Structure formats: C-alpha cells, structure tokens
Image: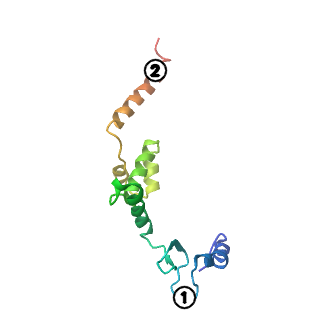
Amino acid sequence: MPLINGADRNLRWFIEDVWGHFDADHTRPGAPLFPSERKNRDGSCSRATADVFRRSLAEAAVQHLPTWAGKLTPHVLRHFCASQLYLDGMTLFAMQELLGHTWTGTTARYIHVHGTHVEDAWVTGQQRATGRWKGLAQ
C-alpha cells in the first residue's frame, strides 16, 4: 500500500531504529508493529488492543480515584469533556462536529450542566442587554 506525506520514511525509521527497543522480535509471526509500553509477564510486548485505554483508565481510577472505581469509562470522560467544552463557550454545532454526531439532539444529551446554568445564562444575557441600552436611555 502506498504511504503518503512521508509516512513511508516515518515507518522505515520506526522499524529500523525504534522497534527493537520494545524487545519485539520481528521474526516472530504476529509480532506487534506498535506494541504498547506494557510488557507481558514473560517480558515480551503485547499489542495495544482496542480496550487498552478502557483497562488503563479502570486501573488508574482504582489507584487514584477509588470512589470512581468501576464507574469511570471512556464514555463518561466523553460526556465530561463535552460538558466542560460547552461551559467554556464552545457552540453546540462545533461540539456536534467534534463528537461526530449527525444530530444536535444527540450532542445536547452529552452536555450536563449545573442546575443554575440556565438562570446564570439568563442573568448574563440581561446584563448584556442592559449594557447595550445604556447609551440609548436619556
């Protein structure tokens, strides 16, 4: 398969100069091309599978956030990040594109805000409107 934008040079560099540092035996069938930093009990590197982030997050939660053990998942982090981005001012449409949702309704369900968020937004909007009217009032 042809590689674009110099990816062939990067892959060659990785295979020739880096791969050996992971103790990956390239002659072994099925040796991982991009092994994870974790090693098996026998010292060999293992493949970075699709669930490596999920498992690592679960282990970190047990160690550092014990009250979240068994509850903290990548999907929970996705909701948290969406909520934080919204609170920091990102528009719903930008978040929709970022999260890859087809419908804004789906994106809206990802946003969890404090109970006072609507009231706070209303007060802020009223203050902005008052500021705009100041110059017009005599």
Tell me the residue that label 1 is attached to: 28
Q: Residue 83: image x %, image y %?
A: 40, 47
Q: Three-letter amino acid code at disc 1?
A: Arg
Q: Residue 16: image x %, image y %?
A: 66, 79
Mark 1 element type: loop
Q: Three-letter amino acid code at disc 2?
A: Trp
Residue located farthest toward the top when viewing the structure as drawn: 138
Could you tell whether 81 is left or right of 29 in the image?
Answer: left
Give the residue drawn at x 55%, y 75%: 34
Badge 1 crowding class, 10 Å Cα cut-off, few under 14, some 14 to 19, many 20 or more, is few
Give the residue drawn at x 31%, y 38%: 115
Q: Is label 1 in contact with label 2 (beta carbons under 8 Å)? A: no
Q: Nearer the viewer, mark 1 or mark 2?
A: 1
Q: Quadrant of residue 2?
A: bottom right
- Residue 2 in view, yes or no: no
Which one is nearer the viewer's eye here, 23 or 63?
63
Tell me the residue that label 2 is attached to: 133
